[in-house]
Image (tube, grey):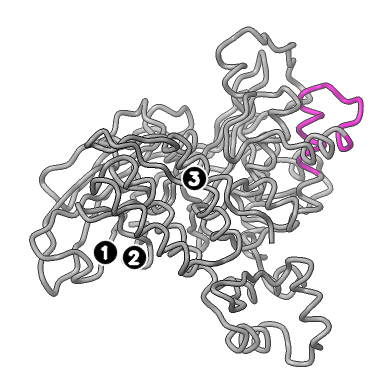
Amino acid sequence: MQKTLMIFLILAAFCSGCVNDTNQKVETDWSKPEQFLENGQLLALSTWVDSAQHAVPMYSELWMKLDSFRQIANRVQLEFSLDEGAVREQLNARIDDDYTQEELEGWEHNGKLEYKVINGEKRYFKRAASNLALLLNKGDGLIDAALDSFCLVHTNEVIRAIDTANTFLAEPQVFEVQFDVRLQADVVPAGEMVRCWLPFPKTSHGRQRDVELVSVYEPSYLLADDSCVHGSIYMEKPAIAGKETVFSVAYNFQSYAEYYDMGKLQVLPYDTSTTLYKQYTAQQAPHIVFSKEMMQLSDSICGNEVRPHEVVKRLYYWIDENIPWAGALEYAIMPDIPRYVLNNRKGDCGMQTLLFMAMVRYKGIPVKWQSGWMLHPDAINLHDWCEVYYQGVGWVPLDMSFSLQKSDDERIKEFYISGIDAYRLIINDDIGADFHPIKRFMRSEPWDFQRGELEWSGGNIYFNQWTYELTLL
């Protein structure tokens, strides 16, 4: 297993030598929680946090940072929830029951069957068996046969429409969405206020238009300004004993496909003095970091190629061929996602995208995160992708996880390197930004925002205590 703690250093860095509200300096050895988490000593970590928190005022900044260690430890246990008997039962059902002990140990050794030793016991990732089936080509990943066929037809239509109209946008689709969150009864004491942020469409993007709020479950709400990174609508209501706490919103919007035939466009040299260039070619810790391994790999893939779109294509092809899609650990417990992807040779859509972004930024090409939902027929899901900036062209969408399509027509095959289909809901234009209004406690997903977020005065409310659902009306 890789080291797991750089993110926690970032969460707690400012706490070294923090002063509490009584001006008494609190000395804390931050190497201890790192070691406890790295070694899976979560009971010892909990004891350490309890001791350290007693020395500081409740809900002070230092107390909150200490609490983040406890939250992450709890999330690790939720992710690695299977014992050996349970994972063997799943393997028998998903693969077959004639694998050998040697094969099992080999899968564990190379990271295909993911586990972690927690409090002295081997515990397996809750999706370890399904991921192994994917990696052994015994199951469908993000793109199944039906979605693959649908996208082939749709992207062909998009290219023809764009060729005919001499534009970059085509094939608009109209969606009416209802998004619901249901908090389990009695998670929050009766009468306590539950604060909720639900995802809401970005309103200023060129291919997402005519956003209309249709209905809101609560009479009082707050829409984040579109200048915020995360599109959200905020509501709050008191918990009622014995009853679920429900939040709901409905909205309409129109989504366009977008495609650029880069072979027909003139890409100019970058103006490296601009704010845009500097921002979107910069490192963005903890998940966009120019590690030695990543830099060496990027250089070996690109060779002497410096033309931006050709560099992008080479990196896209390499990830598509070498990093298969697999179900992901929660990002909150992952310190450096591109490093994890390279070490384990797998990743979900956001993990593949972050690796691509780190490589592309290292090569001096601006790229920014984008995410929300994919709304294809019978394939509604959370999804992450990105946009690459080409001087003289502008921002061009790219979807790393929708892959090279099975077509002899190169434009259709490479559609998702410089295009995106019309079945998208854009919620986020970056990662890890503040909400509006600001969330007090550590988020359930600190970087992306697609499922919603909940908290109350006693702390964050994690994903295992509520459900979310996006419905197309």
| Helix, strand or loop for disc 3 | strand
Q: Are marks 1 and 3 in contact (CB under 8 Å)?
A: no
Q: CA distance from mark 2 to mark 3?
A: 22 Å
x then y, percent, for residue 149: 67, 59
Amino acid type for the residue under numbered disc 1:
Arg
Q: Which residue is mark 2?
A: 467
Amino acid type for the residue under numbered disc 2:
Thr
* Residue 16 can be seen, yes or no: yes
* Sequence-first tag of 2 and 1: 1
**Magenta includes 333?**
no
- Label 1: how many residues lie within 10 Å, few (<14), some (14-19) or many (20+)? some
Q: Which residue is mark 3?
A: 424
- Label 2: how many residues lie within 10 Å, few (<14), some (14-19) or many (20+)? some
- In the visual, does 288 lie left or right of 105? left
x then y, percent, for residue 346: 71, 58
Q: Which residues are magenta?
A: 300-317
Residue sitting nearer the eye, 438 or 116? 116
Furthest residue in direction bottom, as rendered: 98
* Residue 471 can be seen, yes or no: no
- In the visual, does 235 lie left or right of 301? left
- Picture layout, residue 299 above or below residue 110: above
- In the visual, does 422 lie left or right of 359? left
- Label 3: how many residues lie within 10 Å, few (<14), some (14-19) or many (20+)? many
Amino acid type for the residue under numbered disc 3:
Arg
| Helix, strand or loop for disc 1 | strand
Residue in the picture at 42% in, 49% down = 450
- Picture layout, residue 77 above or below residue 311: below
Residue in the picture at 81% in, 36% down = 298
Placement of the C terminus among the 4 image quadrants: bottom left
* Predominant SS of the magenta segment: helix
Q: Which residue is mark 1?
A: 182
